[in-house]
Amino acid sequence: MRQFTLPFLFCLALVVRAVAQVETEVPVEETPAWELRPVASWLEAQIELHRRGFSCGSVDGIRGPQTVAALLAFQRAAYLPETGELDVATRENLLLTAPPLTEHVLSASELGSLQPLPDTWLGKSERDALGYATAIELVGERYRASPRFLQRLNPDIAWDAPLPGTRIQVPAITQFRPARAARHLHVRLADRVLQAMDDDGRVIAHFPVSIARAVDKRPVGELYVTVVVPNPNYTFDPAVFTESEEGRTLGRRLIIPPGPNNPVGVAWIGLNRSGYGIHGTPDPERVGRTESHGCFRLANWDARALLAMAWTGLPVFIEP
């Protein structure tokens, strides 16, 4: 075995120490901290409201009725004058907590997972899952953005055939996680909104919701949650879809597999009234209308948020 003298070991220690000092002295670039500031536009207001659990529907930068409803709910929760406008008091409280936009890079696996959606109930039932059909659908749902807005924001992208590595500007919104537990839900039929409340009756989450087309299919009063199911399948029953010519021809029920394009989306929150529940939908642009068979439809991103708050026995108050 080779022997090292003390002077050699001493010099080696000095060299190691010098190298360590050089390494620690290399400057490290740090991302500048975001400085809170008032929202400067309706687009920024929509993004920040979504971050705080006040859903405006699809982000599009436009002051529409769902955005105004979300802003009113925020103003009420913050004990501000309920103006529905981005007035001084509202801007001082609705501070932008992070940059409004970020970038999504399409991966090969994301693009490889896309599949055209069958246009028949039978075709859907024969799939293993009902995932996203297009890139713009995938990106829009992940970042709560309307397809038209994404196209305006990214005018040079070939959405019909994007390549892996395509960089897309998107709203910087992640999944909402409430700081407080939901103690009861309120559905206001006239306003077509669903709100989660805490023990003090304060709104902790606000969502646009679709309700039944037929007035006699709209339950009023107190119900409660009986089951909470993520990524559910769906039973197509021709007896319910009497308007479906395919259903009349089939004459039998079909099991539709899970996925964001499932008829009830990515979540099913069943209620103690047969056939009624709160669920997602594959068509977020149609949320807020009167067109369901009786259930309450949310955009999939809002259904996911509500799923995290819901529990068996959770009271649901349905108001005219």
Image (cartoon, helix red, strand yellow):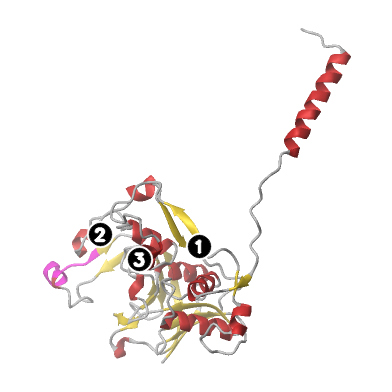
Q: Name the residue under label 1.
A: 101
Quadrant location, the N terminus: top right
Of helix, strand and loop, which one carries label 3? helix
Where residue 284 sits: x, y (%)?
36, 71
Q: Return the mark for residue 30.
A: none
Give the farthest residue toward the left. Answer: 249
**Residue stretch rendered in magenta on the structure:** 246-254
Query: What's the residue at 30%, 68% (across, down)?
Result: 263
* The magenta stretch spans residue 182: no
Hey, which quadrant is residue 10 in on the image? top right
Query: What's the residue at 26%, 62% (across, down)?
Result: 255
Instruction: Between residue 45 and residue 231, name the one nearer to us.
Output: 45
Identify residue type, mark 1: Leu
Q: Return the mark for residue 117.
A: 2
Q: Mark 3 points at which residue?
A: 147
Residues at marks 3 and 1, CA–CA distance in whole angstroms: 16 Å
Residues at marks 2 and 3, CA–CA distance in whole angstroms: 17 Å
Of helix, strand and loop, which one carries label 1? strand
In this picture, is 16 found above or below 232? Answer: above
Of helix, strand and loop, which one carries label 2? loop
Where residue 223 sits: x, y (%)?
44, 83
Residues at marks 1 and 2, CA–CA distance in whole angstroms: 30 Å
Neighbour tally class for label 3: few under 14, some 14-19, many 20 plus, Cα within 10 Å = some
Residue 174 visible somewhere in the drawing: no
Asked if labels 3 and 2 touch by Cβ distance under 8 angstroms, the answer is no
Identify residue type, mark 2: Leu
- Disc nearer the start of the sequence (1/2): 1
Where residue 231 sits: x, y (%)?
39, 62
Query: What's the residue at 84%, 19% (across, down)?
Result: 11
Give the farthest residue toward the front. Answer: 156
Q: Which callout, 2 or 3, points to the residue nearer the camera?
A: 3
Hey, which quadrant is residue 76 in on the image? bottom right
